[in-house]
Amino acid sequence: MSKLVSMHDAIAAHVRDGDSVIIEGFTHLIAYSAGHEIIRQRRRDLTLCRLTPDLIYDQMIAAGCARKMVFSWAGNPGAGSLFAFRRAVEGKAAPIELEEYSHFGMVARLSAGAAHLPFWALRNYAGTDLPVANPQIKTVTCPYTGEELATVPALNPDVAIVHVQRADIHGNAQVWGLLGTQKEAAFAATRVIVVCEEIVDEAVIRADPNRTIIPGLIVSAVVHEPWGAHPSYAQGYYDRDNEFYVNWEQVARDEASLARWLDAWVYGVKDRAEYIAKQPGLDERLKAKSRPSGVVDYGY
């Protein structure tokens, strides 16, 4: 059966008030269009999880979606700070709860969740104050060596939202280029929304199986959303919109300015197609130039 639905319907069916939600992608393939639809549908009391929360979580915090953030590093990569996030932390806006780990601590949490293990052991946190700030970081004695290791609990989000380059209508999803923890997040989550640049025939997926990082059997919904990762990038489709990230510094620094941006670019458009239509020339400015990577013959 086809799992292909609109973004509106995917969010309406699978993201609920009070859920823990992870929108993954490590600078690459970040599902901004899904985050915007969550804002438009005015979801509340969400626990937002992510290794590197950047602009999309700043926007969701400003829109009042977040109750808590579970994260490692937070910022506007290469450009500055997250001002809605800062206002919440500094008590200048509605507060949010924080649960902080290292990058690898978050990878370990998702790996444990994906493997259905209660925790993950790691050599990390020695000489840092994170275990003091976060009591979820504990220790265990290795039964083989006697070494004391740090541990972090499994992370099993209610919903994982993953943007990919291509998928079939059953949810078999392929990614190439920079990988984050999309696979781990999907396998750890209860419900999975796959957002793709391109819908392809199942035969295309079967012809190149090693690129399939998420199998359709764990996917709840598939959304065809070209340009859905903008302003992040989709390898082979479009480049990162660096101007957007630089300009966000001034947009988000002032609470009223950020609210106007949300009114114009999220609440003021009905979907991603309208968002892109408001930016003429985007395709010419950011569309990727072709650079094929050769052909692999799997034989049979």
Image (cartoon, grey):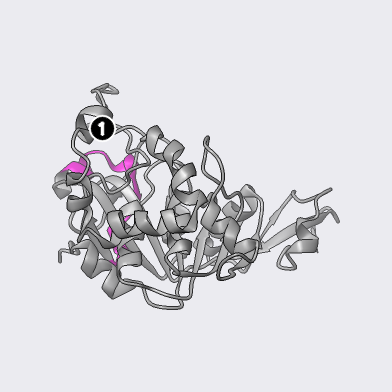
Residue 208 seen: yes
Question: Which residues are the magenta region?
Answer: 204-220
Element marked by disc 1: loop
Q: Is 28 placed above or below 107 here?
A: above
Q: Which of 43 and 6 is in front in this view?
A: 43
Kind of residue at disc 1? Tyr
Q: Position of residue 240 (x, y in %)?
A: 37, 34
Q: In this view, does 47 lie to the left or right of 106?
A: left
Residue 26 seen: no
Q: Position of residue 209 (x, y in %)?
A: 29, 43
Going 42% across and 39% down the picture, which residue do you hit? Answer: 247
Q: Is 156 placed above or below 198 here?
A: below
Looking at the rendered image, the quarter that the N terminus falls into is bottom left
Going 47% across and 43% down the picture, which residue do you hit? Answer: 250
Q: Nearer the viewer, residue 282 or 105?
A: 282
Query: How many numbered marks does the figure carry?
Result: 1
Question: Does residue 207 show up magenta in the picture?
Answer: yes
Which residue position holds label 1? 298
Using the rendered view, name the quadrant where residue 92 is placed: bottom right
Q: Where is residue 224 in the image (x, y as percent from the top left)?
A: 20, 53
Q: Position of residue 228 (x, y in %)?
A: 28, 49
Q: Nearer the viewer, residue 29 or 173?
A: 29
> Dot 1 surroundings within 10 Å: few (below 14), some, or many (20 or more)?
few
Q: In this view, does 5 lie to the left or right of 213?
A: left
Q: In this view, does 113 lie to the left or right of 173?
A: right
Looking at the rendered image, the quarter that the C terminus falls into is top left
Going 71% across and 67% down the picture, which residue do you hit? Answer: 136
Q: Is residue 127 left or right of residue 49?
A: right
Question: Does residue 215 show up magenta in the picture?
Answer: yes
Using the rendered view, name the quadrant where residue 170 is placed: bottom left
